[in-house]
Amino acid sequence: ILNVEQSPQSLHVQEGDSTNFTCSFPSSNFYALHWYRWETAKSPEALFVMTLNGDEKKKGRISATLNTKEGYSYLYIKGSQPEDSATYLCAFVKAAGNKLTFGGGTRVLVKP
Amino acid sequence: DGGITQSPKYLFRKEGQNVTLSCEQNLNHDAMYWYRQDPGQGLRLIYYSQIVNDFQKGDIAEGYSVSREKKESFPLTVTSAQKNPTAFYLCASSLGLAADTQYFGPGTRLTVL
């Protein structure tokens, strides 16, 4: 079973502050990395799918970077708002694979 | 409205009974997936199917069974052989390739009494 880890498990952020957290994955046999946002009482929603080393993706105030050689991805939230409160999941796809292996998630709580 | 539906939202069963969770999609996606979530853990893959009449075991398939007779439907049966069936179950679908975004249903919370 592949080891995909997210840290921290949870974090509290003051409204307006920026924050970031990490997804670590195997650095060999990389194919793709997914990021999802899962709000309470809703279904997980896709944020990004990243495939190339050095990829940077942005969606509004949320952005992500990818380093496949060292096996990590950062997710950044700029100017956090209460609606950013959610669990953020990353999922690793290995080369020649066809399934996602999820990390445990980072739970973000933005306090007004 | 295109999407994935799961029913029911909450399900209670007595120990020793088999139970089937429904998952339907109208996105015309080829691939469908079943995940399980336990408190404090990420999503773990139970079964997946990339095409009708074909499916593969995921990381935690023991005690579960699936069928894929129609493109739109991928029901999951939790059998009495599953030792810890109480969990939150999520169904997802995608176009089919591993880099394709997965779209998730609302989930079913199963409690075995």
Image (tube, rainbow, N blue to C red):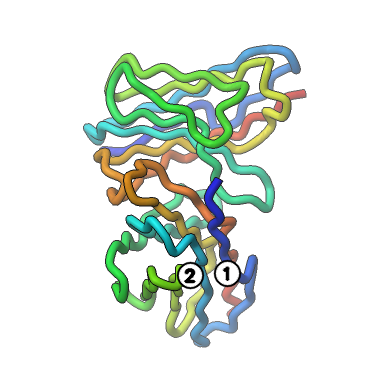
Q: Residue A106: x percent and y percent?
A: 57, 65
Q: Residue A61: x percent and y percent?
A: 37, 78
Host chain of mark 1: A
Look at the numbered disc 2 and give the secondary structure of its residue: helix
Q: Is residue A106 visible in this depiction of the protein?
A: yes
User: Toward the viewer: A6 or A13?
Assistant: A6
Q: Which mark is residue B76?
A: none
Q: Which mark is residue A108?
A: 1
Q: CA distance from mark 1 to mark 2?
A: 7 Å
Of all residues shown, which one is farthest toward the front?
A: A28
Q: Residue A76: x percent and y percent?
A: 44, 78
Q: Categorize mark 1 by other alpha carbons within 10 Å: few (<14), some (14-19), many (20+).
A: many
Compared with B26, A73 (above or below) is below
User: Toward the viewer: A62 or A9?
Assistant: A9
Q: Residue A104: x percent and y percent?
A: 59, 56
Name the residue tied to disc 2: A84
User: Toward the viewer: A66 or B39?
Assistant: A66
Q: Is residue A64 visible in this depiction of the protein?
A: no
Host chain of mark 2: A
Give amino acid for label 1. Answer: Val
Of all residues shown, which one is farthest toward the left?
A: B28
Which tag is nearer the camera, tag 1 or tag 2? 1
Q: Which residue sits at x=57%, y=61%?
A: A5
User: Toward the viewer: B67 or A28?
Assistant: A28
